[in-house]
Amino acid sequence: MTMIKIDGQKIKQLREQQGLTQLYLATAVEVTTDTISRWENRRYPSIKRENGLKLAEALGVTLETLLEEDESESDGEAVDTEAEIPVHRKKKTSLSRVWPLLVLSFTLLGVLLAFLFYAQQTPEPPSFTASRTLPPHCIAGQPFPIIITVTGTPAAAAALIIKETVPEKVTVLKTSPETTSNTIKNGQIKWLEKVSQSTVFAYIAKAAGDTGREITFAGTAASSNDATSTIQGDSTTVIGSHHWADTNSDNIISDQEILTVYDRYNDIVDLDLDIDLIEEIWLGSGYRWHPETASYEIIE
Amino acid sequence: MSRNISLPHPFLFLLVAVFLSHFFITTAYGNGLVSARYLSASGKDIVLSLAIGTPAPASLIVEQYLPPGTTVLSTSPRAKKIDNTRGNVKWLFRNTASGNLRLSITLRAPINGGISATVRYRDPQSGAFTELRIAP
């Protein structure tokens, strides 16, 4: 490696004359501005001949112009070798030390984030609500419907046992779906079904008793994870002299009342609700209940 | 000193236009799930067209009011109740499906307007009872 001794002052003078910056020379020679500064301030620094040529070209002069008066080329003599290190090599060293750490940091961060994400995805235990819908009144000895709507979490289906206690002097005529044992035992209806979203359990019953008697219904819903809850919603109906669908007891089945009947009970399979009778009453001007003959008179 | 006034983004105009047009159209024929309009409101043939959205109500009642004493010869689909004295025709639809429904009445003698209708249903999501008045 051939080294040359340059005149730092001359370099500075030439640079300033041309209005050039140290940065400009540094870029042209591919060294740092610190290096240029050291060259200019040390009176006779030794630099590589190759760098000397680049410097001369950048300043627009011959190499000899930059040399000190008693310049001598020497081999092996390296002064300020640190300054001769090209910019790109210095940067490469600092970058090469940092990037493995960066990669490791991002990998660890990714693993941590993935762990946190999947930890939060643990499925929630199945939960459900059960609610009963009862007509406000019924006629003694006449069938009326009771529906229990169970709403579960959509994410996971759960096996559910519905137990509905049949009140005294109430006879169950039909259930939908059919009960587990197909009989009603010990005054209790039991269903065992898998519920994921919304499921309807229904039955038709008739009650005996005097007008004004209040009949109270109760039941529970238990899931496979041992959670048991009381069936909410309506729990009481009263024996009276109006059809169960005539909710405001005005002896008329109105448009609103018949729409409610269809919306609530239309889709329940095999319930055998006497929808035709309700429709007949709706089409007429009203009805009267005759307890002595246990029949409805439809008023045209 | 000049001022540069920039116009709002064209997409915003389009969005506002679509919103306003939807608003005006629905108020003309009915709002929400069910809308209706007369295709023919005079003469011997009365035709009412219903548009049923999604989810469709489980059941629907349409009551058509005619001038009292108007004799109805036939209806399509078949009406549940026809009262010629009162000028009242009633349909009841169960298991309603989304889409268009056309109700037509053929009269013995032509009429010159004086009709209206009411559509009744329960909103399947809220359970609210809804009544829609339709006029030519």
Image (cartoon, coloured by chain):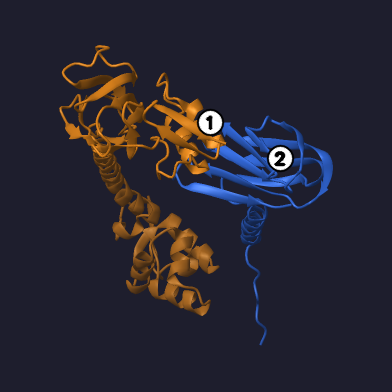
Q: How far is the residue under mark 1 from the one under mark 2?
A: 19 Å
Q: Residue furthest bottom?
A: B1
Q: Position of residue B20 (x, y in %)?
A: 64, 59
Chain for numbered disc 1: A
- Numbered tag placed on residue B84 in the rendering: 2
Chain A colour?
A: orange
Residue placed under numbered mark 1 in the picture: A280
* Mark 1 residue type: Glu
Q: Is residue A20 above or below residue A158?
A: below
In this rendering, would B99 be left or right of A38?
right
Seen at 38% across and 35% down, the residue is: A244
| Contact between labelled residues 2 and 1, with CB atoms less than 8 Å apart | no
Q: Viewed as shown, does residue A129 lie left or right of B130?
A: left
Residue in view at x 46 percent, y 40 percent: A257
Residue at 65% over, 76% down:
B5
> Tag 2: residue type?
Asn
Check disc 1: other Cα within 10 Å, few if <14, some if 14-19, many if 20+. some
Whole-percent x and y of residue A240?
32, 37
- Tell me the element at label 2: loop
Q: Position of residue A50 (x, y in %)?
A: 45, 55
Give the drawing colour for chain B: blue
Q: Is residue A192 visible?
A: yes
Q: Farthest residue to the front: give it.
A: A292
